[in-house]
Image: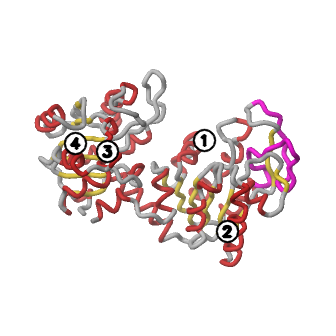
Amino acid sequence: MSTFSSYNFNNQTALVRVDFNVPLDDNFNITDDTRMASAIPTIKKILKDGGKVILMSHFGRPKSGPEDKFSLKHLTGHLKKLLNDPASGQQTTINVLFADDCMGDEALNKAKQLKNGEVLLLENLRFHKEEEAGEEAFAKKLSELGDVYVNDAFGTAHRAHASTAVIARFFPAGKKMFGLLMESEVLSAEKVLHKAEKPFTAIIGGAKVSDKILIIENLLQRANNIIIGGGMAYTFLKAQGNEIGNSLCELDKLDLVKEILSKAKAKGIQIHLPVDSIVADKFAADANTKAVESNHIDKGWMGLDIGLKTCENFKQVIMQSKTILWNGPMGVFEMEKFQNGTKAIAESVAEATTSNGAFSLIGGGDSVSAINKFHLEDKVSYVSTGGGALLEYFEGKELPGIAAVKE
């Protein structure tokens, strides 16, 4: 494996796997360009060296072949805008071309005609079922488009797809590498998982314990504190014998939660649960709400956010931490009535980072959305684009997209 920063791409065609799976509105306007913007430094480094860039990505979940709403052609205008941002002080205009397929004659011809300093975006990889199937012949055809393979798509690193894992086999060790985004994602994740300065606090939220069991069990080997919020907290509270009313609860996971609590106690790890909750009489933005103690929620009411005492308790733990991992919201933050807990945690993580020098990693779609919503992305150490990939990394799994490049 080569180091991207020290590689000279002059006169080389770099085949770059990016994650351009961005949300679009009904008029094909991008509503969040974080993933695209994150790939720009990698693309620009290659172009600055005097190289050519061929970009490949998946987009959405097309069911059977090409569909207009899943075409990457809708992203070309914004990609050109990002690459030619006047604020970068760039002198020459970067040309962005598009190929109507990711392989075949058109892709091959456009790849051959590509000039140094130009970018070619290939059509959606998932228009071919061979991509997700990880077919070797498909990966080989893709590999023929470039001289060098660069994987800069951490968000898909947990998938053993043709363009993320199999394709690397067709490039020698010196011609396959991580891009700048992938490098920073892996370094940040490894820093938290293997080199965390203590105290290490993991904040785990979201709806279900079942979604986070493996990450919690892996963190029991590493963290000093585990803060539990969101809907999953009520399964923990129920396991302790508390009345949780109509709050979300996975009854089939109660024994497992008791086992987690027992393991944590034996290891001296503090698990912090909500002492108070904002409860509602229905799951709706216009629900009636009140603040109650979390150990006794009346029937007909459900916990949809953490309360003020809990926000303060969690803040005290966060402020004493040197390493912080945050994965999952504290409540239904999409609804204004139930966003205070998530906002308070986001502000506490930001304060611990900026004031106390803690290293904070934000991962998982909802946590990233929350940090962005409250405009705190520049107040934390690292905001991951990974989602499911980061989750699997913290579960202790080997990610195929990483392993393939390291071979």
Q: Earlier in the sequence, mark 1 or mark 3?
A: 3
Q: Nearer the viewer, mark 1 or mark 3?
A: 3
Q: Residue at (69%, 53%) from the top-left corner?
A: 232
Q: Nearer the viewer, mark 2 or mark 3?
A: 3
* Rendering coords of residue 332 (x, y %): 68, 42
| Residue 81 appears in the picture as rendered | no
| Nearer to the camera, 350 or 209 | 209
- Mark 1: which secondary structure? loop
Q: Quadrant of residue 183?
A: bottom left
Q: Amino acid at mark 3?
A: Glu
Q: Amino acid at mark 2?
A: Ile
Image disc number at residue 131 = 3
Q: Quadrant of residue 221?
A: bottom right
* Rendering coords of residue 158 (x, y %): 41, 55
Identify the residue position indicated by label 2 in the image: 260
Q: Which residues are magenta?
A: 286-310
Q: Residue at (48%, 51%) from the top-left corner?
A: 388
Q: CA distance from mark 1 to mark 3?
A: 37 Å
Q: Residues within 10 Å of mark 3 (few under 14, many from 20)?
A: many
Q: CA distance from mark 1 to mark 4?
A: 35 Å
Image disc number at residue 53 = 4
- Mark 4: which secondary structure? strand
Q: Residues within 10 Å of mark 1 (few under 14, many from 20)?
A: few
| Residue 247 appears in the picture as rendered | yes
